Image (cartoon, helix red, strand yellow):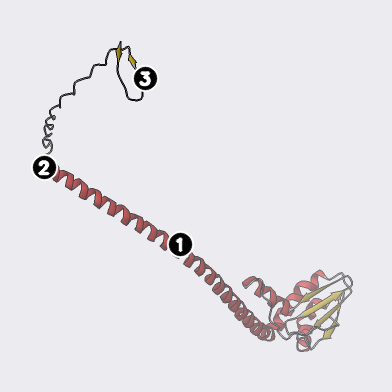
Amino acid sequence: MRNHALSGVLYAEDFDAPEPVAPAPATAAPSPPPEPIVLEPTFSLADLRRAAEHAQEAGRALERQESELNAASLRTDALGRIADALNQARGDADRIAADAASATADTVLAAVAAVLPGFARLRGMDEVAALLRLLLPAMSHEPRLSVRVHPSLIDGLRQDLAPLLQDGSTSIDWLASDTMQPGDVNVRWQNGMMVRDMTDLCAQVVALIAPGTTPINTNKETNDGQ
């Protein structure tokens, strides 16, 4: 035990041995720098050329792909424009065809309406006489017939049909109608009638040539007594 006189302290006791003081470590020498790593080239000039060629080919491939995409887009756009043009042309063609059909129908009807009356005047007598020659034998059981025709036909029909009426089994009442066409005839008997109307024939001809058209008036007036 040691007594140490300390200022301000009555006494101090130290029962432990003094701690040893470690010597200061020696300064270590600096480590030498690492040796530099030298990379030896593993490719040749031919490899560099091939790599450059591959890069150029890849660039050209990208350009071709882009060009093909642009061309495909242009083709798609062109096809769309063509389709629109075809639809427009189809609509125009339909309208043109409809206009042409209507004009043709009107022309045909006008021609028929103009020709048939003239034909009836020229051949009306022959047409009506031929029709009555076919009808009278079938009407032999009828005692009386009423025949209405244009006035210009009555005398000629009487003479033409006289041989068929010699037996006297059937008599004919001839009725003149100024409103009838020379080719028209209206035959009536007890339970029936037969009519040949040039206006109706004209309409039927036009309906066959141009269906759906409205017949042009042939200036034929209807006789209330028919």
Given this view, does label 2 or label 1 mark the residue nearer the observer?
2
Q: Which amino acid, mark 3?
A: Leu
Q: Quadrant of the C terminus?
A: bottom right
Q: CA distance from mark 1 to mark 3?
A: 115 Å
Residue 106 is situated, as x and y percent measured from the top left of the image, at: 62, 80
> Mark 2: which secondary structure?
helix
Quick one: label 2, few (<14), some, or many (20+) residues within 10 Å? Answer: few
C-alpha span from label 2 to label 1: 50 Å
- Mark-to-mark CA distance, 2 and 3: 96 Å
Residue 171: give x, y in percent of width and height: 87, 78
Residue 174 versus residue 38 in the image, above or below = below
The residue that disc 2 covers is 46
Q: Look at 78% across and 72% down and name the residue there.
A: 135
* Amino acid type, mark 2: Ala
Name the residue tied to disc 1. Answer: 80
Residue 16 on image: x %, y %: 31, 12
Residue placed at 35% from the left, 58% from the top?
A: 70
Residue at the (74%, 75%) spot, across then down: 131
Q: Is residue 167 above or below residue 18?
A: below
Q: Residue at (48%, 65%) from the top-left corner?
A: 84
Q: Is residue 46 left or right of residue 168?
A: left
* In the foreground, 209 or 192: 209
Query: Splitting the image into 4 quarters, where does residue 2 fall?
Result: top left
- Label 1 secondary element: helix
Tag 1: amino acid:
Gly
CB of mark 2 within 8 Å of CB of mark 1? no
Among numbered discs 2 and 3, the one appearing first in the sequence: 3
Q: Which residue is mark 3?
A: 10
Quadrant of image for the N terminus: top left
Q: Earlier in the sequence, mark 1 or mark 3?
A: 3
Q: Which is more toward the observer, 6 or 100?
A: 6
